[in-house]
Amino acid sequence: MAESALQLLSEIGTLLCRQTRSNKDSVLKSLKHAANALSEIEQPSSPEAAKKLEAAKKLEVATKPLRKAIVQGLLQHKDKEVRLLVAICVGEMFRVMAPEPPFEDKYLRDIFKLIVSIFAELADTTSPYFSRRVKILETVARCQCCVIMLDIDCNDLVLEMFNTFFSVVRLDASHTLHLPHLIDEFLLCIQRAEATTSILVIPEGAPCASYQLAVSIIQNCAEKLEPFICGFLTTCILDRDAVENELKEYYHEIIFQIFQCSPQMLLAVIPNLTHELLTDQVDVRIKAVNLIGKLFALPKQHVAQPYHDLFLEFLKRFSDKSVEVRVSALQCVKAFYMASPGTESHEILTALQDRLLDFDDRVRTQAVIVACDLAQSNLKFVPPKLISQATERLRDKKMCVRKKALYKLMEVYRDYCNKCSEGHMIISDHFEHIPCKILMLCYDKDCKEFRSQNMELVLAEDLFPVLLSVEERTRHWIHLFSLFTPLHVKALNSILSQKRRLQKEMQIYLALREKEKVHRNKEEPFPNLDLPQTIPAQEQIKNTTRQHPYDAKFPKHKTPKPGSLGTMSEGLMFPHLAAATPPRKLNPSA
């Protein structure tokens, strides 16, 4: 052991004790010398016990003045740089004087509070003091200071320290922060702590690296953690009111996160979720359905197979007495079906098809949404029966269901048209039946949005993708005609006849305006420069409108896009009306 370093350390400590009102610069200078001196000192390691004891005694005597100066004033210093140097000196003293702590128990809490506050500044990786803070972290981990914190009942500081670690660790600094040291700290505390679950709480909004840190801890301590975590989660499921821990508000999320990284740990917990599916509390059933749906949807896990009884009870929630529960179950279908091909997926699909005929319109609406989303996710392999049953909702007794079905089915049809145009699919009857069913909405007299003039715009502007070529549209129309029944022909004729009637009335209207203009010019050969004769013209237009009431019946006619029904005839009759109008947007929320 360097005698000169011990002597210097003793002198610096004595100097700091005597300086009652020393300035910051002198304190910083003294602490820097003390930190350098401590870094040169090694822990007594003589093979002879007597010599080792003597060396330890010398070390204790040499550091006593510095330790006294720290606990009597420097520990409460407000300057950030001074506090950092104090923490460095404290960490070095823990190192050289281990395994015994360098301070009495009554001072250790304040010592550890200082160290934890230094850890909170690890987030600033650009700071010139960053490497020194990391050095403190390494020293604290090596000396197992967290065990001392638990021994003196500083559990709150342990939690604060670990929450700080979760907050400051980042992926771009992981190599600098030495994640193994953080993991070692957690492992030591887990082996000593009684309330293990509290240590593993990840603060809301914590960065991704903190999640990886928690995953490493769980995977490395699965055997130690399992009885604590399983006991806590099982109690939350079976008797939540008996749990006093605030984590009971988040136990569903805890189950999901732990299951992703260590599913074997929860083998005894997952089956208990059946209890929540059978409870009378609707909100609990909804949360359970959402959790189980997410578990079943985990890719490559096939959770429904080992927990078959839970899966069967989950299926029954599709016919739950609560509308909200049935809707929640439907919202899990797409992810489940995409992640778990097999028998279970077919059963889920059957449950979805049954809900298309649910007695509540909210459930039927959700079923249509899910069926169409599922179809869009994989148009090639979606069961034709599902598309057919979803299309039938265009005839639903509730207006809201018909509107939502129209909007979602047109989305599916547009995707299908794009796939056909790209050569990924061929024209299929079960998709082409969608516009056939849409055409039949013309017979719906209860909704003004389904009247002939509006349905013409739907077919012209909303049915096909905007960029789909005229040739592709024609291909689909030709196939559509082959599927028409007399009712479809009648509906299409109704749309076209209404359009033709409107065009004729518009021709008459424009001809009358032109005739009036010529008549007015003959009566006034010379222009009147005083005031424009707007009043007679306005009156004449009103009279003309009254003579043609059909004009008032269709006040907002729009010219369809090229390639739509009636464009050619309209272009021939009204070349001066060829200016395009903005396309009508279908309201998805209608």
Image (tube, rainbow, N blue to C red):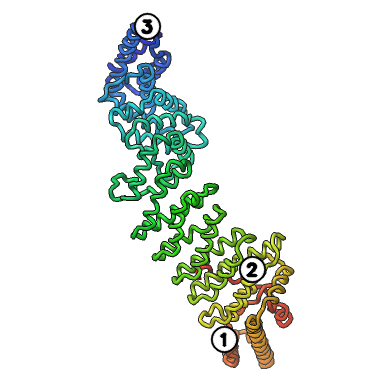
- Which mark's residue is nearer the viewer, 1 or 2? 2
Residue 39 in which image quadrant:
top left
- Which of the pair 538/71 is nearer the observer? 71
x then y, percent, for residue 545: 58, 89
**In the image, what residue occupies the spot 66% across and 93% down?**
523
Q: CA distance from mark 1 to mark 2?
A: 38 Å
Q: CA distance from mark 2 to mark 3?
A: 89 Å
- Asked if one can make out residue 25 in the rendered structure from this viewpoint, the answer is no
Neighbours of disc 1 within 10 Å: few (<14), some (14-19), many (20+): few
Left or right: where does residue 91 sit relative to residue 125? left
Question: Does 66 sit above or below residue 49?
Answer: below
**In the image, what residue occupies the spot 63% across and 60% down?**
381
Decide which of tag 1 and tag 2 comes sooner along the chain: 2
According to the picture, the residue beneath numbered tag 1 turns out to be 552
Decide which of tag 2 and tag 3 comes sooner along the chain: 3
- Residue type, numbered disc 3: Glu
- Residue type, numbered disc 2: Phe
x then y, percent, for residue 378: 61, 59
**In the image, what residue occupies the spot 56% across and 55% down?**
342
According to the picture, the residue beneath numbered tag 2 turns out to be 431
Question: Does 527 sit above or below residue 77?
Answer: below
Residue 50 in which image quadrant:
top left
According to the picture, the residue beneath numbered tag 3 turns out to be 48
Q: CA distance from mark 3 to mark 1?
A: 112 Å
Q: Secondary structure at mark 2?
A: helix
- Which of the pair 168/369 is nearer the observer? 369
Decide which of tag 3 and tag 1 comes sooner along the chain: 3
